[in-house]
């Protein structure tokens, strides 16, 4: 029988397959046309995120990005669109980035350290409006 894998095993495997950037590089990538995709749960997202971020929780990402799925999100249909993925500490977003690459997305970068690193760097946090 194989050895049981931990969450960090999955995160480390994902991080070995993706490109990560530091929070101080986010602004220049936003200027290049990247958009932030926040994969945290809605309550986490509502507590503060990066200006202009789109929230699609990790748990529904594959369905939201599946072109064949009736509940897909139109924002995720363009596989050439540039995305910066964000979560709390960069574990969920790393796994999301790896999955999105497998789904054909070509311009995916993970924000290393997530919103925790963003706040630690004292960068602006936006509280989304409830719509």
Image (cartoon, rainbow, N blue to C red):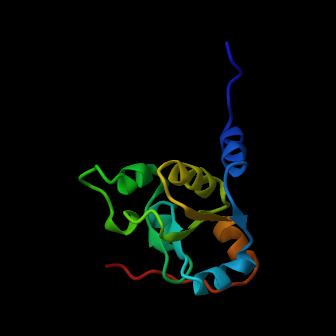
Q: Taking 15 as reference, is 108 left or right?
A: left
Q: Nearer the viewer, residue 45 or 19?
A: 19
Quadrant of the image occupied by residue 25: bottom right
The answer to whether 52 is drawn above or below residue 66 in the figure is below
Task: Name the residue rendered at 50%, 58% in the picture.
Answer: 105
| Image coords of residue 125 (percent x, y) | 59, 82
Q: Taking 1 as reference, is 64 left or right?
A: left
Task: Name the residue rendered at 74%, 80% in the picture.
Answer: 24
Q: Taking 111 as reference, is 39 left or right?
A: left
The answer to whether 106 is drawn above or below residue 3 in the figure is below
Q: Quadrant of the C terminus?
A: bottom left
Can residue 29 be seen here? The reply is: yes
Q: Taking 86 as reference, is 131 left or right?
A: left
* Residue lying furthest top: 1
Quadrant of the image occupied by residue 86: bottom right
* Residue lying furthest left: 70
| Image coords of residue 95 (percent x, y) | 59, 50
Q: Nearer the viewer, residue 129 or 113?
A: 113
Task: Name the residue rendered at 63%, 65% in the picture.
Answer: 109
Task: Name the residue rendered at 69%, 60% in the picture.
Answer: 19
| Image coords of residue 63 (percent x, y) | 36, 50
């Amino acid at each position: 029988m194989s050895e049981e894998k931990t969450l960090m095993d999955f995160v480390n495997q994902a991080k070995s397959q993706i490109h990560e950037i530091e929070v101080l590089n986010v602004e220049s990538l936003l200027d290049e046309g990247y958009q932030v995709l926040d994969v945290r749960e809605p309550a986490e997202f509502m507590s503060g995120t990066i200006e202009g971020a789109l929230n699609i929780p990790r748990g529904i990402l594959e369905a939201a990005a599946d072109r064949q799925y009736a509940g897909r999100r139109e924002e995720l249909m363009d596989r050439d669109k540039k995305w910066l993925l964000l979560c709390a500490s960069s574990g969920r977003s790393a796994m999301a980035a790896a999955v999105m690459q497998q789904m054909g997305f070509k311009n995916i970068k993970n924000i290393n350290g997530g919103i925790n690193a963003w706040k630690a760097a004292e960068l602006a946090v936006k509280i989304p409006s409830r719509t």
